[in-house]
Image (spheres, coloured by chain):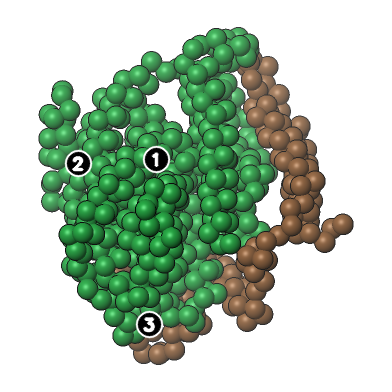
Chain colours: A green, B brown
Amino acid sequence: MSTIDSILYGFQVALTWQNIMFVFIGVLAGTVIGMLPGLGPISAIAVMIPLSYGMPASSALILMAGVYYGAIFGGSTSSVLLNAPGVASTVATSFDGYPLAKQGKAGKALAIAAIASFVGGTFATVGLMLVAPQLAKVALSFGPTEYFALMLLGLTAIASLSDGSTVKAFISATVGIMVATIGIDGQTGTQRFTFGSTKLLDGIDFLVIALGLFALAEVTTLIISRKESLFKKGSDIGSLKITKDEVKEMAAPVGRQSILGFFIGVLPGAGATIASFLAYITEKRLSKKSDTFGKGNIVGVAAPESANNAAAGGSFVPLLTLGIPGSGTTAIMLGALLVVGVQPGPMLLTDHPDVFWGVIASMYIGNIMLLILNLPLIPYFARILYIPKGMLISLILIFCFIGVYGVNFSQFDLYVLIVFGVIGYLMRILSFPAAPFILAFILGGMMEQSYRQALTISNGSLSIFIERPVSLALLLVALASLFVPLILSKITNRNNGAKAA
Amino acid sequence: MLRSMDRKVSLVIMALAIFYLTLSYRLPKFAFTQVDADVLPLGLGYLLLGLAVILFIQNKPETEEQKEKRTLKKEDLILLLVTLGALILYVFCLEFLGFVISTIIFLSLTMRMYGYMNWTRNVIVSLVFTLFLYFAFNYLLKIYLPQGILPF
């Protein structure tokens, strides 16, 4: 099938009325949850997973993907209006978005953010459509050796997921793999760390960890800030109009940053947050009016918004073609796919073309829906922020509990959920990042299996990993990806430091 | 020497690593395999131990922002602990009281606790939300939430 035939087939999947509804529910829920400061895309997706039980795999992924890019879209709204970014990847948007809002031009900033996000998201979807099938073809020849190298590559992404301390990120990841070792070992049948309890034989479900470490831990932030109202009544967001000159000014940066953002998203670990900061910095350097950045420059809103949405799309490339998540968010999505019985990887394209092409087609639709939801409806939409926090906190708690209960119908899992909620809260206040934990938890089990399979093939000789060219190359890239994001984040930090000074 | 938070945490992590290693060494051996079930756990245990030592030695000074994250008003701390207690109690009651009753009680009490003072609206929201979820999950998604003492 040519790409055109395939994408038309994808639209056939995505345009059934159920799937249109799921895209809509996804982007709407994503926008709303993304808007709430504190709740990020990982929580948004984890909270929505119970809805996908029993759904066809394509619908489930369409829903999750919608939640993901919806959350990044929604995050920009609270960045601009409240200077309280809903998600990390929209922090850069607040640098210029909030000053614009203070000048009474919130409407303009939101409109620019929406359009830039739309362009970035749509560009990434085109990129995904063109790049992913090629990569999947290459990946078909991969054996356990290559897979191990790939997963190691995915894990090195952790270096860039850390906020500040790399050691803490690695500790978090190591404990993540340790938790993954609980249960019966797949190869020898040995019970590991079950303490003789039958309830731990199957290990701990990823949803328990996702909802505990993210959603429950994030709810504590809402509890502590419960008295601050989210949105001041009567604030006027001003006109949404953008002039022709402004469009001209934005066009080049948005174009550039969409492309750059997409490729950053494809790289494991480099994700939407880094893409948005990088976009902000490069555009500030390139701009003739760089002194107006930070004081309400429209390019300062447009550039990071196009980049983070493009990166979100780009992160689907490794997920769908290799089955390797490059970020915490895609790790959750991988977990969700496993729940509905689909193993993402190079075979996805041939075994489940409906999932593959359906999701891509749904992204075109979802981006258009988001543009419509965000542009004319923004003044009404921002009122979601009026929902009393007290009510919201309790409802989110209950939703987490139902989600976990629905997996195994076990009270024990709920206690484990509470334990992980406490751990997540402690990690949060001690500045241990939680994303490496969940990424390592999901990759850890797969990694162990392929490592042992590879060594069984080679009769115990480790040289198999460097004798096979693809595996060697991947290991080298893994090494590079360990250091490149480190350097990137150094640059980012230095620029932030310069900005603060 | 132990004044820094990172150092205290690193000691806890070291203890955790040692505990995990002890358990790993006790894993039963299996003769017919290239890589036995204890290889990864042992590796992880030592890795964690090493990382904890690095954290201890690094001893980075805390930024103001990090310190602020840790300081908690007494009132907030009590509320968090009460929330924890409420959650445990909720899970404890879930199966024998059933989803509907325990959730309605949990929701209306916690909403008030988090500052939504209007009792009437509070109870109405709890009631509608709970029943909506219960019927949606039981009849649409076929995920059976605990029925408890109620007949439906």
Q: Residue type at mark 1?
A: Gly
Q: Which residue corresponds to mark 1? A: A265
Q: Outermost residue toward the right?
A: B1
Q: Which chain's residue wears label 1?
A: A
Q: CA distance from mark 2 to mark 3?
A: 38 Å
Earlier-in-chain disc, 3 versus 1: 3
**Where is residue A101 shown, x and y percent of the image?**
35, 72
Q: Which residue corresponds to mark 3? A: A232
Q: Is residue A196 above or below residue B40?
A: below
Mark 3 lies on a secondary structure that is loop
| Residue density around tag 2, few if under 14, some if 14–19, many if 20 or more, within 10 Å | many
Earlier-in-chain disc, 2 versus 3: 3
**Where is residue A205 shown, x and y percent of the image?**
50, 46
Q: Is residue A402 left or right of residue A380?
A: right
Q: Which residue corresponds to mark 2? A: A361
| Residue nearest the observer in this picture, A358 or A195 | A358
1 or 2: mark nearer the eye? 1
| Residue density around tag 1, few if under 14, some if 14–19, many if 20 or more, within 10 Å | many
Q: Which chain's residue wears label 2?
A: A
Q: CA distance from mark 3 to mark 1?
A: 35 Å
Q: Residue type at mark 3?
A: Lys
Residue drawn at x 27%, y 26% is A133
Residue drawn at x 30%, y 30% is A132
Circles 3, 1 touching at the beta carbon (< 8 Å) = no
**Where is residue A57 shown, x and y percent of the image?**
28, 41
The answer to whether one can see residue A167 in this image is yes
Residue drawn at x 37%, y 43% is A261
Q: Residue type at mark 2?
A: Ala
